[in-house]
Amino acid sequence: QVQLQESGPGLVKPSQTLSLTCTVSGGSISSGDSYWSWIRQHPGKGLEWIGYIYYSGFTYYNPSLKSLVTISVDTSKNQFSLKLSSVTAADTAVYYCARSAKTTVTTGVFDIWGQGTMVTVSS
Amino acid sequence: DIQLTQSPSFLSASVGDRVTITCRASRGISSYLAWYQQKPGKAPKLLIYAASTLQSGVPSRFSGSGSGTEFTLTISSLQPEDFATYYCQQLTSYPFTFGPGTKVEIK
């Protein structure tokens, strides 16, 4: 079955760019049957959807972060990535990658999640 | 954005209890609602989607109902492994948003 694994630096300096990668195993991003999302959770807080990408490169971002976020896909590596620019302490969070199946009722239903990676923004 | 509220925010219950959590949306979302369970240090786990469809592998003691603006998650007989935080999430419009969570603790 499909599994997701986040990777990237756990510490980022303020004003720099946070970069994370999600590696997909057990399935192909190019199958076209899924959307691939990033979601974050501030310490002790709720969940915030950042955006998703389709294998074709189509993206949709949360408007609250749109100007700072880029999600990209590398089908040859079966990975998708998140870049969040100009980070501040407020971007300190656990970042999850997640999959949602591309159907009428499940686009946006996150049925598979990575384990999450904690990113701290601090000098 | 569609805002979701959950009640209660905290719930203390005993093993075997019937537990109900309510999620309300700021505007109608038809049945485009999902429920997740999250345990400390773990990723959320999908329990229910389309308001009432049980995700494969999820025990039948979990059920969901509702449509429009009011939804409920019910655990018919609380088990020790059910102590966790539960989130609702709407997927009818962008951006997808989550409720603030309901923490279920052992009485």
Image (cartoon, coloured by chain):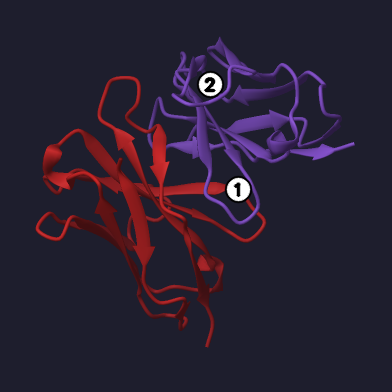
Chain colours: A red, B purple
Q: Judge if badges 2 and 1 mark residues of a common chain.
A: no
Which residue is the site of mark 2?
Answer: B27
In-image side of A77 versus A89 (left or right): left
Horizontal and vertical percent position of residue A59: 23, 46
The chain identifier of the residue carrying mark 1 reads A
Q: Secondary structure at mark 1?
A: loop
| Residue closest to the eye, B62 or A56 | B62
Q: Amino acid at mark 1?
A: Gly
Q: Amino acid at mark 2?
A: Arg
Q: Quadrant of the N terminus of chain A?
A: top left
Residue pictured at 54% horizontal, 38% vertical: B98
Please tell me which residue is depicted at 84% across the width and 38% down the height of the picture: B106
Residue lying at the far right in this picture: please name it. Answer: B107
Above or below, comparing residue A9 to residue A41 in the picture: below
Q: Which residue is mark 1?
A: A46
Query: In the rendering, at what x and y percent does residue B57 appear?
Result: 48, 26
- The residue most toward the bottom is A123
Q: Is residue B22 visible?
A: yes
Q: Quadrant of residue A21?
A: bottom left
Give the number of the mark in front: 2 or 1. Answer: 1
The answer to which of B97 and B14 lies nearer the viewer is B14
Residue A28, horizontal then vertical, whole percent: 17, 45
- Taking the image as shown, residue A35 lies to the left or right of residue B16, namely left
Give the CA distance from mark 2 to mark 1: 20 Å
Q: Residue at x 75, y 20 (%)?
A: B77
Q: Chain of mark 2?
A: B
Crowd rating for badge 2 (residues with CA inside 10 Å; few <14, some 14–19, many 20+)? few
Q: Residue at x 65, y 31 (%)?
A: B5
